[in-house]
Image (cartoon, rainbow, N blue to C red):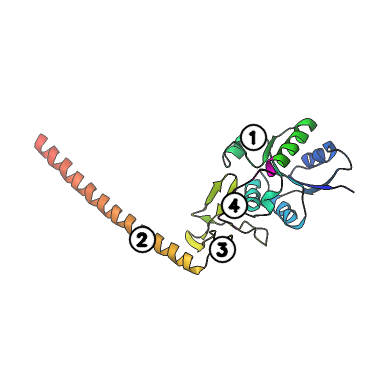
């Protein structure tokens, strides 16, 4: 019986089959997922020894799956290999050096695959700072972090991700860390008050700018009159 379960999350059948065929027979049980949502569900359900995650996936991107995994205290301990045909797709989101996971470029051969798996398992054993802001893995398989003004607000620290959820530009839930718990509605109220205060400051600044514009127009008009 295989002692190690490896989950390969990739929308290309060829890649999933390739990984299965390149691994030493009998040592690994290979599970497959064709999209990010299916992959995240298997990550939650199975006791995995390794995750191989394509960065571009349907339904839920590899980046979103990565965020969910890194935001969970236990899931982020699983050795991880991120795969992509273009490394810059990964480095745009996660800066190098990759401390706690390994990158595997496509296409790859058996030696590169085995090497990436070994490095990922080594990196997963490295001591990591405690997870401070923790966005829980969503039970319905969707990202726990929603977006502010249509973009995800994600703070990464040493490869970990923490997201602040928002709906239509207003805070829906303040996801922060207090011994790994989610803050109460008091924090949401405080955040709302801070945002309101900022909006007031912005409005005042805009009014001052408009006043300066008018003064500048008057000065320019005066200079033009004098030149004439």
Residue holding disc 4: 130
The image quadrant that residue 189 belongs to is bottom left
The image quadrant that residue 19 belongs to is top right
Residue holding disc 3: 182
- In the picture, measured across the screen, residue 20 lies left or right of residue 79, that is right
Give the image location of residue 46, x and y in percent. Answer: 77, 55
The answer for how far apart the CA atoms under marks 2 and 1 are is 43 Å
Residue holding disc 1: 86
- In the picture, measured across the screen, residue 49 lies left or right of residue 153, that is right
In the image, the segment drawn in magenta is 123-135
Q: Nearer the viewer, residue 110 or 125?
A: 125
183 above or below 72?
below
Give the image location of residue 14, x and y in percent. Answer: 79, 39
Nearest to N terminus: mark 3 or mark 4: 4
Q: Are marks 2 and 1 in contact (CB under 8 Å)?
A: no
Residue holding disc 2: 197
Give the image location of residue 188, x and y in percent. Answer: 48, 65
Neighbour class for label 3 at 10 Å: few (<14), some, many (≥20)? some
Name the residue: 12% across, 42% down. Answer: 222
Name the residue: 53% across, 64% down. Answer: 183
Residue 215 in view: yes
129 falls in the magenta region: yes
- In the picture, measured across the screen, residue 213 lies left or right of residue 14, that is left
The answer for how far apart the CA atoms under marks 3 and 4 are is 15 Å
Give the number of the mark in front: 1 or 4: 4
Residue 228 in view: no
Q: Are marks 2 and 3 in contact (CB under 8 Å)?
A: no
């Amino acid at each position: 019986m295989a002692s190690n379960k490896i989950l390969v999350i990739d929308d290309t059948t060829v890649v999933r089959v390739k990984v299965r065929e390149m691994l030493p027979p009998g040592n690994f049980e290979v599970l497959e997922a064709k999209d990010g949502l299916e992959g995240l569900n298997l990550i939650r359900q199975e006791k995995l020894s390794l995750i191989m995650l394509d960065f571009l996936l349907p339904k839920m991107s590899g980046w979103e799956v990565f965020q969910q995994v890194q935001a969970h205290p236990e899931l982020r301990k699983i050795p991880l290999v991120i795969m992509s045909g273009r490394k810059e797709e990964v480095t745009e989101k996660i800066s190098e050096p990759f401390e706690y996971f390994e990158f595997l470029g496509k296409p790859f051969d058996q030696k590169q695959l085995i090497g990436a798996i070994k490095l990922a398992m080594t990196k997963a054993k490295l001591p990591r700072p405690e997870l401070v802001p923790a966005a829980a893995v969503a039970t319905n398989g969707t990202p726990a972090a929603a977006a502010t003004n249509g973009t995800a607000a994600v703070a990464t620290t040493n490869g970990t991700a923490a997201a602040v959820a928002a709906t239509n530009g207003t805070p829906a839930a303040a996801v922060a860390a207090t011994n790994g718990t989610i803050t109460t509605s008091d924090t949401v109220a405080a955040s709302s008050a801070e945002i309101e205060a900022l909006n007031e400051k912005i409005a005042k600044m805009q009014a001052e700018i408009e006043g300066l514009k008018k003064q500048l127009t008057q000065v320019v008009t005066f200079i033009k009159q004098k030149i004439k």
